[in-house]
Image (cartoon, rainbow, N blue to C red):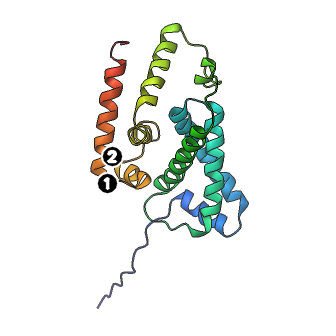
Amino acid sequence: MHTTSTAPSQPIEDIDSACLRALANGDRAAFAQIVERWQTRLINFFYRATGNRADAEDLAQETFIELNRAATRYQAQGTFNAFIFTLARRRLIDGYRKKARRPLEFVDPGEYFMQSQPEENDQSREIEEAFHRALAALPENQRNAILMLQQQGLSYDEIAQALDASVSAVKTWIHRARTHLRQELKSLV
């Protein structure tokens, strides 16, 4: 007689969750791996949300600091993507609050373009500026949801978890954001 025992299957841990667990156990190299994998994605997310490269870099750094602090209490519920973007969203909200307390400052239009981008023709620059204005005009929840979907490739479930909202609310925000962006940019196409 052949007996099969089925051991309870454990979910497979992703590389970032494993690195975070290693960080919690004192492995500093694991943190460097997370930063290397996520730095560009976070800076791009924050840049699209703020339109300012320096602010984007500062917010990414603050997110990594918060991630380092949260490593010991991290529970792998949901995906690492949702976890890190939840932290990123909190930093973005804090950034908006800090900026609201500061007086308005002069913004050089050249700051709207990442320094690593090559010179573009005038029409591309005009489209880019119009896109940033349209994106900035979106309510925060719509802007965050559309950026997480389009720029970061998160699923609706991951976005809902990161934004602490229902999946149906996320779908509504994304639909409204797309409609707004389409309306604002249709005259340029």
Q: Is residue 8 above or below residue 181?
A: below
Q: What is the tally of numbered marks visible in this picture?
A: 2
Compared to 79, does 95 lie above or below?
above
Residue furthest to the top in view is 122
Looking at the rendered structure, the kind of residue marked 1 is Ser
**Among the 4 quarters of the image, the one containing residue 164:** bottom left
Give yes or no for contact between labels 2 and 1 (Cβ–Cβ under 8 Å).
Answer: yes
Residue found 32% across the figure and 88% down from its top: 3
State the residue position of label 2: 170
Q: Residue at x 66, y 46 (%)?
A: 61
> At label 2, which amino acid type do we have?
Val
State the image coordinates of residue 138 (x, y, percent, origin top left): 40, 33
> Can you tell which quarter of the image residue 92 is in?
top right
What residue would you read off at disc 1? 166
Percent coordinates x, y for residue 60 in the rendering:
62, 44
Of the 4 image quadrants, the one containing the N terminus is bottom left
Q: Secondary structure at mark 1?
A: loop
> For the residue carrying disc 2, how many other residues have a C-alpha within 10 Å: few (<14), some (14-19), or many (20+)?
many
